[in-house]
Image (spheres, helix red, strand yellow):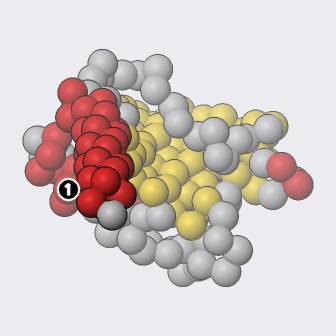
Amino acid sequence: MAKKFVSFFYFVITVVILIVTLKIANYLPMALQKDTMRQYKSIEEVKSKLNINDVYVPSYFPQGLMWPPSTILAQEKPFVAIILEFSHAEKGDVALIISQSTSAAFAPDEKIKILRINEKADYPFKGRNITLEAGVCKGEEPCSRIVWDEGKYRVNITARSTSPALMQIAESMIK
């Protein structure tokens, strides 16, 4: 009986050590690479953990989109980048993506791909030069994108909507 108890005790200790080891192994990559792209729970968490003060969020928010963002991704290295994804309230799919980055080449609109651009225009808007693209996404759904430089950031807004609706969002983000 004592021998069975000792064997069971060693088994329990082995399982506990294994669980603790796996927890540490799971935590280490996040601790060592805390400034690479990962998901956050809130915009405030991004600001505090990555020490990023300027996160551009619209003050105008169209009906039909859910607040808060359904996904918040951010990184500090190799360059600062923040992605906010907003879902359609009824359909649940991503309907708006707002990103900002210190790299001009960064454009995370994989979830909303403009398949055909029907119109592209560059023009001044509230003291900035913006690029507006209007076209269609999958299923001939209207899609549009606005891109401009805001200080050290390139701001990119892509939405499953018409360009006038997107212009209202962009206008509310420019201070």
Q: Position of residue 122 (x, y in %)?
A: 53, 32
**Who is closer to the viewer here, 24 or 35?**
24
Q: Residue at x 26, y 28 (%)?
A: 33
**For the view shown, which residue lies furthest in the right direction?**
139
Can residue 36 be seen? Answer: yes
Check disc 1: other Cα within 10 Å, few if <14, some if 14-19, many if 20+: few
Q: Residue at x 54, y 80 (%)?
A: 63
Judge left or right: residue 6 versus residue 117: left
Quadrant in which the C terminus is drawn: bottom left
The image quarter in which residue 134 lies: top right
- Position of residue 1 relative to residue 110, above or below, is below
Q: Position of residue 110 (x, y in %)?
A: 63, 39
Under circle 1, the secondary element is helix
Judge left or right: residue 98 versus residue 7: right
Q: Position of residue 3 (x, y in %)?
A: 31, 54
**Who is closer to the viewer here, 57 or 52?**
52
Q: Amino acid at mark 1?
A: Glu
Q: Residue at x 66, y 64 (%)?
A: 93
Q: Position of residue 139 (x, y in %)?
A: 88, 55
State the residue position of label 1. Answer: 45
How many numbered circles does the render carry?
1
**For the view shown, which residue lies furthest in the front direction?**
1
Quadrant in which the N terminus is drawn: bottom left
- Position of residue 65 relative to residue 39, above or below, is below
